[in-house]
Image (tube, rainbow, N blue to C red):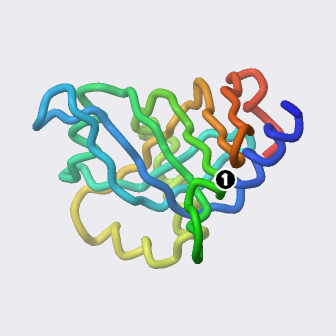
Amino acid sequence: MREQALSEAKQLVRHATSGVLSTISKNMAGYPFGSVTPFMLDSEGNAYFYISDIAQHSKNMAQDSKVSLTVFVAAAEGDQNENARATLVGDCHKVTNTKQKEMIKQFVTHFPESKSYEKAHDFAIWKLEVKRVRYIGGFGKIFWLEQNEWVGSF
């Protein structure tokens, strides 16, 4: 059952293009702050975001790297709790300057509309290094997936 849950969680996150990124608020100390944002994955299962330096998330992550990314399938009708969801928990840091251009190019390939971000405010790629994943595949199908299970095969 655990192997099936791991496979389902990876499939869910692999096919998603956006999720709710939650950070620890700098403005309201200690409180969570969540917002919908696009993301892409690397082959290890880590998530990447392309975020402006003036965005609240960037300010929050610069102060406290602890974040979560919740990905879910929206219910077309019925009970939302019957649909799968996964929350990736870990630390998020700006990608090093030497990798920024390469990662921006990859992000723009996934999200062509983000090409225009280069002309706006200072945008940068942030990497969420996954520590644990909480997967809920429906009633009674709830697992904490560990980093060593999550990493790889994406």
List x then y, in percent, for residue 69: 49, 44
Q: Nearer the viewer, residue 47 or 141?
A: 141
Res 110 → quadrant: bottom right
Q: Say left or right for 73 vs 108.
A: right
Residue extending farthest to the left is: 27
What residue lies at 52% left-to-right and 31% top-to-bottom? 89
List x then y, in percent, for residue 55: 22, 52
Image height of 43 relative to 40, above or below = above
What residue lies at 63% left-to-right and 61% top-to-bottom? 16
How many badges with numbers are in the image? 1
What residue lies at 61% left-to-right and 39% top-to-bottom? 46
Is the N terminus in the top left, top right, bottom left or bottom right quadrant?
Answer: top right
Image height of 49 relative to 15, above or below = above
Amino acid carrying mark 1 in the image: Ala
- Which residue in the protein does label 1 denote? 84
List x then y, in percent, for residue 92: 43, 33
